[in-house]
Image (cartoon, rainbow, N blue to C red):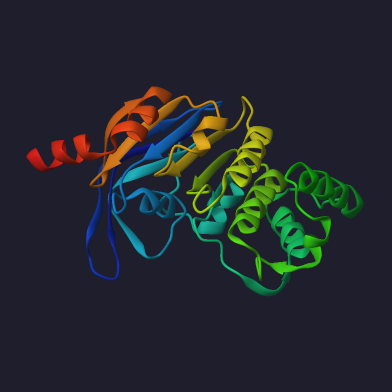
């Protein structure tokens, strides 16, 4: 579904090299996790996949379902069936949650949605995420707590039902109960025909999910790949071993 080949990127503002030859393959039905210390390039990877203009692809390629997407704009990539949950969701005054969800769904759907069915589906998803149904009438993320913003991101995921979900530190700043609810939403979304890439520096959210692969990203490269046991190793010992390996090389 997603293949990244030798991806090298730099930041536009200061020209700093961030990703330094990253390779990754994600197939249908898989859950992948990328972990790494702060500044290793995790969020840069997510933003580069979605054509954030703050980053320039120096070399390499990004393939989605076998086709390069490097020349596509962000909205065009989304319409292919890709989704990005932001590390820090922004507030959008003047746009209600309900209007945002309907507009987004219409934008990626080939058919006009039935408003009644859509409202019922949204209500059901909000109930599963323990969200107050009145939130559809509130301005998008305005006055929301950190946990409410992250739940709203997962509500968007369930609404749009993309082929590939990239979740950038969805668990950041959440308490134990909120993490369980967000994990439940991810499990509701997950099936054999889609895929998930979770970017995190914590192992908390992984305790509620079945993970196929864990990748360690340090200094712009994936330096080790394993199963869920690798995440437990990081939880116990941290990244010092892998940072040391990079420094020695």
Depth check, front residue: 181 or 56: 181
Could you say where residue 186 lies in the image, as x and y percent from the top left?
62, 38
Left or right of 243? Residue 89 is: right
Seen as rendered, the residue at the extreme bottom is: 94
Depth check, front residue: 170 or 175: 175
Q: Is residue 93 above or below residue 235?
A: below
Residue 249 visible: no
Could you say where residue 46 lies in the image, as x and y percent from the top left?
43, 50
Left or right of 92? Residue 40 is: left
Q: Is residue 227 above or below residue 156?
A: above
Q: Is residue 72 above or below residue 187?
A: below
Residue 115 visible: yes
Left or right of 139? Residue 41 is: left
Could you say where residue 38 lies in the image, as x and y percent from the top left?
31, 52
Left or right of 61? Residue 135 is: right
Q: Which image quadrant for residue 213?
A: top left
């Amino acid at each position: 579904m997603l293949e990244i080949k030798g991806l090298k990127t730099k930041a536009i503002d200061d020209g700093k090299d961030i990703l330094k030859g990253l390779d990754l393959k994600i197939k249908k039905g898989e859950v992948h996790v990328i972990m790494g210390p702060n500044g290793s390039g995790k969020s840069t990877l997510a933003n580069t996949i979605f054509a954030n203009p703050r980053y320039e692809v120096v070399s390499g390629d990004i393939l989605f379902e076998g086709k390069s997407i490097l020349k596509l704009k962000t909205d065009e990539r989304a319409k292919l069936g890709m989704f990005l949950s932001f590390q820090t969701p922004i507030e959008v005054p003047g746009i209600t949650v309900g209007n945002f969800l309907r507009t987004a769904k219409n934008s990626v759907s080939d058919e006009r949605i039935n408003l009644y069915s859509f409202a019922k589906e949204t209500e059901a998803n909000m109930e599963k995420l323990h969200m107050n149904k009145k939130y559809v009438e509130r301005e998008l993320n305005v006055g929301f707590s950190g946990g409410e913003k992250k739940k709203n991101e997962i509500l968007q995921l369930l609404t749009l039902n993309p082929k590939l979900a990239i979740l950038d530190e969805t668990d950041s700043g959440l308490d134990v109960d909120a993490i369980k609810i967000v994990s439940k939403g991810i499990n509701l979304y997950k099936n054999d025909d889609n895929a998930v890439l979770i970017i995190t520096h914590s192992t908390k959210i992984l305790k509620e999910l079945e993970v196929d692969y864990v990748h360690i990203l340090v200094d712009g490269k994936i330096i080790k790949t394993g199963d869920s046991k690798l995440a437990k190793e990081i939880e116990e010992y941290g990244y010092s071993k892998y940072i040391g390996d990079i420094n020695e090389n």
